[in-house]
Amino acid sequence: MTRGTFDFKRSPSGSDHDPALTVVVEDDPDIAALGEEWQALEARADGSFFTSWTWIAALLANGLVHPLVVRVEAAGRLVAIGIFHRRARGFSRSLSLTSVDDPEYDAPYVEHNGPLVDRDYPEASGIWWQAIGRLGASVVYLPGIAPEALPGLRRLGTVLVERQQPAPRRSLAPVRACGGDVTALMSPNSRRQIRRAIRACEQSGPLTLDRATTPDDARLAFARMAELHRAGWRRRGQAGSMSPLFCRFHLDVLARGVAAGTADLLTVRAGDRLIGHLYNFRYGRTVSAYQSGFAYDTALPHEKPGLVCHALAIRHYAEQGLEIYDFLAGAARYKTSFADHARDLVWLRLAMGHAPLALMIRARARVAAYRDRRDI
């Protein structure tokens, strides 16, 4: 294990804290000690499930990151933390935040990414992002982060935004006010479709939603969900995302999260007939709809298993007092039909100095500017 530190002698206007914040960079950390620190900070932070120790511990346990940990400390108190995967490429070094930057190994797709920051030290967030410029990497991959970080990152290097996607969300307080009936808040067309689908399902018996309460039950439901997911994608001529690595990683997440109440494997049935499964994450008062598998092959006319499962899940979480049902990134029609607002997420690469990627981005920008001038 190696450890290095450097100080930032700057604090935003209006901060009540000591302006001297120390950045601590550590590779190959002691995992047990890291877990204790991380979970203690979680209690003082407003993160996401993807910055929780449940997710980070599963990444580490499955060897999906070769960790470089970046901390911000105030007088020895941990106030921000994030973890990078580090990889040497020839004479350069690349970093990727809470991910591997490899299509196969990034199957455990990360969103709402970024540092975990003590809510009493908001200035630590800016310091943590600034520290990226001093980590010695030529390229840093930052997937699923908030676009608010972009201005600061552009001051560090050359930014290539690979994509920007909305994460549609449904506020649950209005659903509670409607007695749990989310369709009352939807467009007339969506309302008709979902209510008709619910009536069609109920021809087989009452609709029920159950949550796996033990890791064993969750594993069985996950296996059924994976097969339904694959079958659904085979019908479209594609493979889907349920690779062996994906399943191994998420079985670890379930083992950690089901007992803690942070990972839900839901099963929806009409009588004895399976309608589908939802795999969701709970963090604070937000639930994230991460993965699913629906019984399309046995669906009856007018049934829409996916819409029915999400409608029941939204009612379930509204009744439990949660505030947000997050459909995560992507503008699929079913997501936007349920949602009443969205948050944008960006996937980008930050190229430092004269890294080849930075030179390529600048060359493309010059060509584009030249073409624009010719078109005037």
Image (cartoon, rainbow, N blue to C red):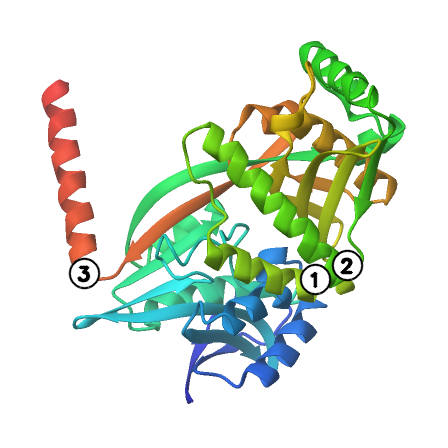
User: In the rendered picture of this protein, how many numbered marks are placed on residues?
Assistant: 3
Q: Describe the element under mark 3 as helix, strand or loop.
A: loop
Say whether residue 312 is left or right of residue 226.
right
> Which residue is labeled 1 in the image?
257
Amino acid at pointer 1: Gly
Residue at x 67%, y 57% (from the top left corner): 219
The quadrant in which the N terminus is found is bottom left
Q: In terms of secondary structure, where does tag 1 sit?
A: helix
SS at mark 2? loop
Residue 23 location (% of width, % of height)? 47, 77
Disc 2 designates what residue? 261
Q: Give coordinates of residue 100: x percent, y percent.
A: 39, 62
Determine which of the numbered discs, if any, sits on residue 355 in the image: 3
Is disc 1 surrounded by few (<14), some (14 to 19) or many (20+) residues within 10 Å? many
Contact? badges 3 and 2 (CB < 8 Å): no
Between the residue at mark 3 and the residue at mark 2, the CA separation in whole angstroms equals 44 Å
**Looking at the picture, which amino acid does disc 2 mark?**
Gly
Of tags 3 and 2, the one toward the viewer is 2
Q: Quadrant of residue 248?
A: bottom right
User: Which of 282 and 361 lies nearest the eye of the viewer?
Assistant: 282
Mark 3–mark 1 Cα distance, whole angstroms, equals: 40 Å
Asked if 371 appears above or below 278 in the picture, the reply is above
Q: Earlier in the sequence, mark 3 or mark 1?
A: 1
Q: Position of residue 240 (x, y in %)?
A: 46, 40
